[in-house]
Amino acid sequence: MRLDQSDLPGGITKVRLSGSLDIAGAGEIEAPFAAISSTRDKVIVDFTGVTFLASIGIRILVKAARAIGGRKGRLVVFNPTPDARKVLRSTGLDSIVPVVADEAAAVAECAK
């Protein structure tokens, strides 16, 4: 699992995930993702490259959403694969974290 971070206008941090978000992948990104979620208030997560999403990956997203939300910030996931979207829906994560189609929609969601 790979995590790339970039800053966008408006104080938005874009996190791009690539690979399998299983137990091994989660172990690779947990610390850097926690660091981002503890310091940034507007985070969008690009799921384009996520090839598999396990429950441990959901846990990382929930922890990040709680940390960011506790500061009145926003975490948004965008462009998940059909399989990842199914997992996000079936676990109910999409009721906690907005899941949108593309980067423009994620940026707009952060502005709310």
Image: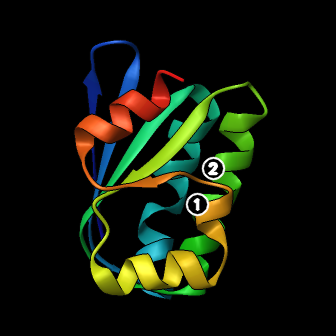
Mark 1–mark 2 Cα distance, whole angstroms, equals 5 Å
Vertical comparison of 58 with 87: above or below: above
Q: Amino acid at mark 1?
A: Leu
Q: Residue at x 28, y 24 (%)?
A: 7
Residue 44, label in figure: none
Dot 2: what SS? helix
Q: Residues within 10 Å of mark 1 (few under 14, many from 20)?
A: many
- Residue 35 lies left or right of residue 9; in this view the side is right
Q: Residues within 10 Å of mark 2 (few under 14, many from 20)?
A: many
- Residue 66 lies left or right of residue 12; in this view the side is right
Task: Depth check: give the residue in front, 93 or 6.
Answer: 93
Dot 1: what SS? helix
Q: Quadrant of residue 20?
A: bottom left
x and y percentages locating residue 76 in the rendered image: 47, 46
Q: Quadrant of the N terminus?
A: bottom left
Residue sticking out furthest to the top: 10
Tell me, what colour scheme is on the image? rainbow
Residue sticking out furthest to the right: 70
Q: Residue at x 54, y 23 (%)?
A: 112
- Mark 1, residue position: 61
- Residue 68 lies left or right of residue 17; in this view the side is right
x and y percentages locating residue 27 in the rendered image: 50, 73
Vertical comparison of 81 with 30: above or below: below
Vertical comparison of 97 with 67: above or below: below
x and y percentages locating residue 32 in the rendered image: 47, 49
Q: Residue at x 58, y 27 (%)?
A: 39
Q: Amino acid at mark 2?
A: Ala
Tag 1 and tag 2, C-beta contact below 8 Å: yes
- Mark 2, residue position: 64
Figure disc tally: 2
x and y percentages locating residue 102 in the rendered image: 25, 49
Q: Residue at x 50, y 38 (%)?
A: 36
